[in-house]
Structures are given as C-alpha cells and as structure tokens.
Amino acid sequence: MSNTRYAELGRFLRSRRERLRPEEVGLVPGPRRRVPGLRRDEVAVLAGASVEYYTELERGAGSQPSDQMLAALARALRLSRDERDHLHRLANRPVPHRGGSASHVYPAMLDLLTRIGGTPAMVSTDLHTVLVQNPLALAMLGDLSAHRGRAASFIHRWFTDPAARRIYPLEDHAPQSRSFVADLRAAVGRRRPGDTEAAELVDELLRRSPEFRTLWADQDVEVRRNERKRIIHPAVGLLDLDCLNLFSEDGRQRLLWFPPRTGTGTAEKLALLTAPGTRTMRTEPVR
C-alpha cells in the first residue's frame, strides 16, 4: 500500500476517533481530557489492538491491517456501513460480504450492547456467527468471535465439533439441536433465494451431520426468541439463564443477553466472573 494511502487511512481513523464521545462507547469521560473525542489508547483497547500499533496506523506508518482488525476498528469507532466500506478501501482490502466474522455490526446494536453492563450480552448474525461480546459474555463463554471461515457459525460447530457442546448439560443437547435447526430454517427462509452463504452452510451440515439431516427433514421452523440456557462454567459452576433476543430490522443480526434466572444463585455467580483472577471460559480450538 502506498504512503499516500497509509496517510489517508490515518487521517480517516483520526477524524472518526475525534468525533466520538467516551460515553457513546461506554467509557467514563473523566474530568481532564486534553483531546476531543476518544484517546488513541481508548480506541486501541476497544479494538483489541496495542496502543503502539494503533498509533502507527493513525500516523500512516503502520503495516496493512487485516480484515479482522479493520472490522474491530469499525466497531470501536461506531462506523456506518458506508464508512466501514471506505475504511477497507483505504486499507486496500476487499469490502466484506454480509456474513462471517468480519460482518459490519449495526451501530444501534453496538450502542445497546455498550449499555448492558451487568448482564452477559453479544451480537450475532442470523447464522449464529458471533460478532462482538461484552466483557461479561467473554468471561462466561470465551471469545466466540475468534473462529474463522464456516466454523465461525456456532451452528456449524454445534453439529460438527463435539467440543462446542461441552459447556452445556448433556440433557440440554437434544433440545438445543432442535432449536438451532428450526431457527436456521427460519433464517434461510428470510434470505433472498439463492443466498450462497446460507445454502453452503446447510449443504455442509447435511453432508457432515446425520443428526442435522434428521432434524432438517422434519421441516420445523421457529425463530429463537426467548429460551432457557444452562452453561457449565469451569470456575463458578452451573449458570441458569434466560436467553433473550432483539433483532435488527432486516433480521440479519440479533442482540442476545443472558439475565440470570431468579432463585438459582446465578446472579451471585455472574458477579464472581467480574472478580480479578477468576478463570474465564476457554473456547474450543479454532479449526
């Protein structure tokens, strides 16, 4: 990438950083701020990058950022879809298609996620690819956005990788499978005919999973909205939660949050997950 292009990328990042207020991204403003908008170190933390790396990007002297880093920066800076596409072009990267772990997260979804503090929450696609999680969801479930390719979809991992099921009680596996398949059929139906992302996911699951083939043949359709979810955490034990969903207008993304079920002791266990030194969930290996 040319030096001119690097400089344009840096100027664009700086302009987007300076327009954001700390409270818009869930940060405490503080009494003494010497710069308009966010500081570089704050953007770096939000994007999961080192301060040095982000500083070099703004100065126009960094290396070409990856697609995943660009997606993280777009989320940290609350970019619109047009701004996200412009960021990729400045970095000489192809504009991502809709779907996958680099999908653009709708700013309204990110805003709501930022405001949900004491409850695990995350944003995923209609194919159950997790795009972003709040800190408590990371502590509870591990980093579910670390997967790449078709395995980024949790439905794909559920039916192809036994490790994906280890955090769920055995007696919950069959109901979860039925729920996932019915929800996937609803998602496929909402998408336009010939959508390759959904069709390829279904085709691969039909090839690889006898359980999926049996359930898919039942033709059940039901959007996952509100349901009970039980998670076995290695540090605090069984978490008994409600799983609530809020959908984007086009149905392609959903905000999920997991309030504790009353009378189960889960609220106290979730509080422990925020304590320093508490072991967080490790995700199954990325394949």
Image (tube, helix red, strand yellow):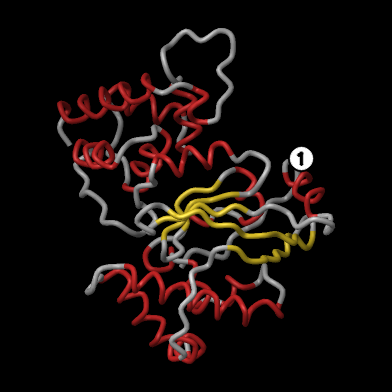
- Quarter of the image for residue 266 reads bottom right
Q: Out of 282 and 62, give the one closest to the viewer.
A: 282
Residue at 50% x, 23% y is 22
Q: Give the vertical position of 80 relative to 279 (above or below).
A: above
Which part of the image, by quadrant, shows the N terminus? top left
Where is residue 84? Give x, y as percent.
28, 40
Where is residue 213? Give x, y as percent.
44, 89
Left or right: 3, with 226 as reference point: left
> Which amino acid is tagged 1?
Ala
Q: Give the vertical position of 200 relative to 143 (above or below).
A: below
Q: Out of 4 and 143, give the one closest to the viewer.
A: 143
Residue at 31% x, 27% y is 13
The residue singled out by tag 1 in the image is 275
Judged from the image, the secondary structure of the residue bearing numbered disc 1 is loop
Question: Quick one: label 1, few (<14), some, or many (20+) residues within 10 Å?
Answer: few
Q: Give the vertical position of 241 relative to 67 (above or below).
A: below
Left or right: 224, with 194 as reference point: right
Where is residue 282? Give x, y as percent.
63, 58
- Quarter of the image for residue 57 reads top left
Left or right: 169, with 164 as reference point: right
Residue at 53% x, 67% y is 224
Left or right: 59, with 228 as reference point: left
